[in-house]
Image (spheres, grey):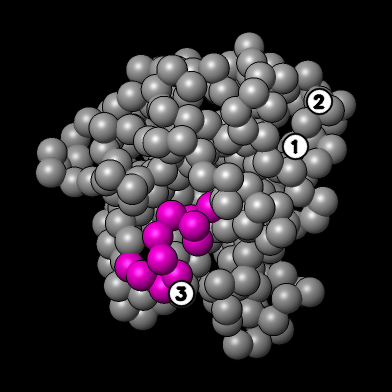
Amino acid sequence: MSTEGTPAATRFLRTTGQHAVIEPDEFTEGGFVLSIGGAEQSHVNLADPSDIFYEYLRRIGHVVDLAAPWGEPISALHLGAGALTLARYIQATRPGSVQYAVELERELLDFVLQQLPMPAGTELHTVIGDARESLATLPAELRFDVVILDIFSGPEAPEHIASTGFYLEAAARLTPRGVLIVNVGDEPGLTLVRSQVAALRRAMADVAAFAETGMFAGRHPGNIILTGTQGPWPEVWTAALTARGPHPAKVLSGVELDVLSA
C-alpha cells in the first residue's frame, strides 16, 4: 500500500482542546503516524499490522504473544485506544479475537477508524468514556485474556486509575489465564513506576517489569511495561521476553523487582 502523496488529515478534539493529525510515514510503506497536540502518539502500518514501530508497544505485543498459544484467538480489552495499533496486531496474529477498546475522546476514535480502517474481519467493540467508569459498565459476564492499560504518561496520572482499587476491578475481569498489562511512561526517578508496581502487587498474585535495560537505572524518561499475573510469574516468560527484545531488554520479577518498590 503506497502512501506517497496522501495528505495529512486533522481533527479537533473537544475533550482536550487539542488537534489530532494523521499523516503518512515517509519511511514506512503503508505507515501512518497519529500526533496529538503536536506530539507523536501512535504509529500504524496498514500494509502489515503485525509490524509495530514503537518499542514499548512491541514489548506489550510480546507479552500478549505469551498469554495464549500462538495464533489462538483471545479476548482483549484496551483501556486507551490511540490509533488501535495493538488491536490491529492482535487481529493480525490471532484472527478471530474478540476485542473491546475504551477511549475518552469520541472524536479521536471516530477519526482513527475513519482514516485508518481496521483489518477485515476484526471484531472490535468501542466504548467512549473514562477507563474505570467504562470498565464497570461493560456486560457483567465479559472476561478477557489480556487487559491492556495505556493511559499513563508522567506523574500526572489520574489517581482513580493509578490505584490498587482500579487494578482489583480490572483483575476481576480476567479469565483464569488472563494477564493485566500496564504501560507506564515516566520521568527520571521513576516515581510513577514505583507507585504502580506497589499498587499492582497488592492486586495481582505476581508482577514483572519489562523495559529497555537502561530504563531501570531511573536516569532518563521512557516506558516500562508492568504485567500482573494471577499465579507465579513464569520464568520461561522472562527468557522469552528478553530474547525477543527490542534489545537491550531486561525483565525484573520477584525479589529483583523490589528495587522498584515505592
Marks 1 and 3, how far apart at CA: 27 Å
**Residue at the image position 71 percent from the left and 59 percent from the top:** 243
Label 1 sits on a secondary structure element that is strand
Image-quadrant location for residue 157:
top right
Q: Mark 2 points at which residue?
A: 218
- Amino acid type, callout 2: Gly
- The image shows residue 226, relative to residue 161, as above or below, that is below
- Of residues 238 and 20, the one drawn nearer to the viewer in this rendering: 238
- The image shows residue 238, relative to residue 203, as above or below, that is below
Q: Residue 92 carries which label?
A: 3
Query: Is 224 colored magenta in this rendering?
Result: no
Q: Where is residue 151 in the image (x, y as percent from the top left)?
A: 52, 36
Q: Which of disc 2 and disc 3 is earlier in sequence?
A: 3
Of the two numbered discs 1 and 2 in the rendering, the one whose residue sits closer to the viewer: 2
- Give yes or no for contact between labels 3 and 2 (Cβ–Cβ under 8 Å): no
Q: Main secondary structure of the magenta part?
A: loop
